[in-house]
Amino acid sequence: MILNRLRVENYRNISFADLSFDSGVNLLFGENAQGKTNALECIYSFARGKSFRSAKDEELVRFGEKGFSSEITFSDREREQTLSYCYYGGERKRLRNGVTLSKQTEMIGHFRAVLFYPEHLQLIKGGPSERRSFLNIAISQCYPAYLKLYGDYSRILENRNCLLKLSQKGLSIDKNELEIWSDALASVAASIWIYRKSYIERLTQFASPLLSDISGKKEALSLSYESDVSGENEKEIREAYRLLFRENLMKEISLGCSLYGIHRDDLNVLINGISARSFASQGQQRSIVLSLKLAEGELSRSLTGEYPVFLFDDVLSELDEYRRSYVLSDPGERQFIVTACEDSGFDLSLVHTTLVSAGSFRKKE
Ligand code: ATP
Ligand code: MG
């Protein structure tokens, strides 16, 4: 998948830009605070359905303006497609190839991208929610049905928690209703569990040889799904959750919330057999996250037939020469859009450079 073009108006500090991209490595190069990350944020919002900085639409509007519009054109082996998003006076308009999309979730799954930005280094040392979020985003790009399941899960969890909280406060609740929510939660949790388990197994097959290569065969990576339940298939997982809910109901009531479910799980990362969260050095963390991001792209290609676009914000400057060239010297069919404040570490004969200054973009010929 190749991003061909980005057009934006009044998005953050960009009053207007019409940018073209090439296959291979594209470098957005400029000093701090010029608009490099803003451009990536806009591109990635078409993959994720929202800003990765979790900004609200109002914050994306260029100061003093009433709205913004953005549009990408991208192509896969079959055709060229357009997605556009416009926010004006509180109204949102989403189009795919000129046809209106009514929901934000309908945007997801068409344009696929892998984002790597400095905060992702927290993926190893941060809490389990960082790793769950990595899994959720990666899986939903390949399987839009996962996103729907996850939305259902959150809604059911909220309802169940609400009943548990009422019961904790001593109010009488309908026990049948609680059981219905518990069963529904077990069912959806089991479907999500299976997606995650299989995604992690397949991701390992790509990530572990990548880390071995990046580290000069020094580091071995293994990934596993850490969960309260285990089983061979969806039915067994569903039954395991049901049992957990039944056995721990009094405990859950006394705490007023759901203590078990896929919202508590984790992705366990081991490097050379020991916990990366506890023991990985800074350099090892960088290498692991880089392998995970590249592996996410490889897996996405094996599941969908196309590489996603790789968006690397500022992270290459933190990698040493060897790892940087590992990524950039042989992009093959992959397209990278990377940002940097310094171009010294790049082989400029291999990259397509765009200079970024005060929200304006100029392609270097
Ligand atoms: P760095 O190299 O430091 O990461 P950058 O080029 O990636 O810099 P951006 O994060 O893209 O910089 O931000 C550029 C500027 O955009 C910032 O100075 C920020 O204040 C400005 N900005 C953010 N939101 C808005 C907005 N809604 N309207 C106008 N300007 C904005
Ligand atoms: Mg930036």
Image: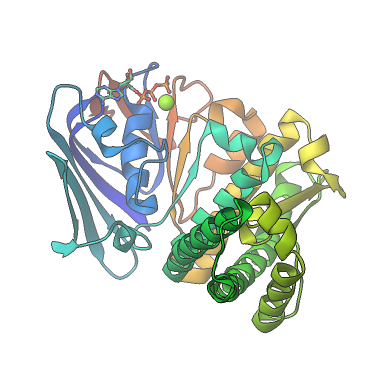
The quarter holding residue 182 reads: bottom right
Q: Quadrant of ligand 1?
A: top left
Q: How far across and down, in percent of the image, does residue 185 sit?
A: 57, 69
Q: Position of residue 79 (x, y in %)?
A: 26, 67
Query: Front-most of 256 and 342?
Result: 256
Q: Residue at 66% across / 62% down in the picture?
A: 200
- Mark yes or no: residue 170 visible: yes
Residue 288 in the image: x percent, y percent? 69, 43
Looking at the image, which is closer to me, 159 or 173? 173
Relative to the observer, which residue lies in front, 353 or 226?
A: 226
User: Which quadrant of the figure contains the C terminus?
Assistant: top left
Residue at the spot 40% in from the left edge and 57% down from the top edge: 112
User: Which residue occupies the extreme right position in the image?
Assistant: 273
Q: Tell me if I can see residue 259 in this picture.
A: no
In the rendered image, the quadrant that contains the N terminus is bottom left
Where residue 55 sits: x, y (%)? 36, 35
The residue positioned 60% from the left and 69% from the top of the image is 189
Q: Quadrant of residue 29?
A: top left
Count the marks: 0
Q: What colour scheme does the image use?
A: rainbow
Q: Is residue 357 left or right of residue 188?
A: left
